[in-house]
Image: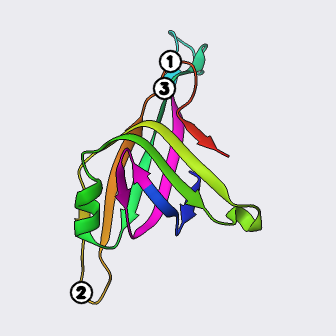
Amino acid sequence: MPSVHNPENVSVGAIDLSDVLSIEWHEHRREIVSPPGDGEIYHRRVGYGSAVAGGRLTFSDPAQAAAAAGRFGTLTAALKGVGGGPDRTLTITNARTGGSDNLSGHNRAAICEVPFLAASSDGTAGPVTLT
């Protein structure tokens, strides 16, 4: 799963998000495996179904995570010097954030994550671009 740490200028829709520690995103396609027939050991048909795009935003502040929860719109972030290369912009269209999962422990920083899913605008173009 690609990941960028310390992203800048992160927003979802019209909401600017501060103190985003990381953004993780993926585009998974679910496996389709038909069961083998009698006496067969291997599957005869395998493939991949439709793609699902999503990921999570990570914060160290539960209040910032709560502000990011329940949002809809285009998720954007400026990614500085990815892999030592040029600056990039991450754009994820039709992103919908879920609720926040928060963890705090003894003598450690809090970890607060907000998952998101993203949908294609036309069913064929992926919602994630990195330019």
Q: How is the image coloured?
A: rainbow
* Image-based side of 15 in relation to 30, left or right: left
Q: Mark 1 or mark 2: name the one nearer the start of the chain.
A: 2
> Dot 3: within a 10 Å radius of its alpha carbon, few (fewer than 14), some, or many (20 or more) residues?
some
Label 2 belongs to which residue?
106
Height in image: 115 above or below 104? above
- Of badges 1 and 2, nearer the viewer stands 1
Residue at 69% of width from left, 60% of height from top? 87
Q: Where is residue 11 in the image (x, y as percent from the top left)?
A: 42, 53
Residue 43 in sight in this render: no
SS under mark 3: loop
The residue range painted magenta reads 11-30
Q: Tell me the amino acid under the disc marked 3.
A: Ser
SS under mark 2: loop
Label 1 belongs to which residue?
122
Q: In which quarter of the image is residue 42?
A: top right
Q: Position of residue 95 (x, y in %)?
A: 40, 39
Q: Tell me the amino acid under the disc marked 1.
A: Asp
Q: Tell me the amino acid under the disc marked 2.
A: His
Distance of mark 1 from mark 2, alpha carbons?
47 Å
Residue at 45% of width from left, 58% of height from top? 10
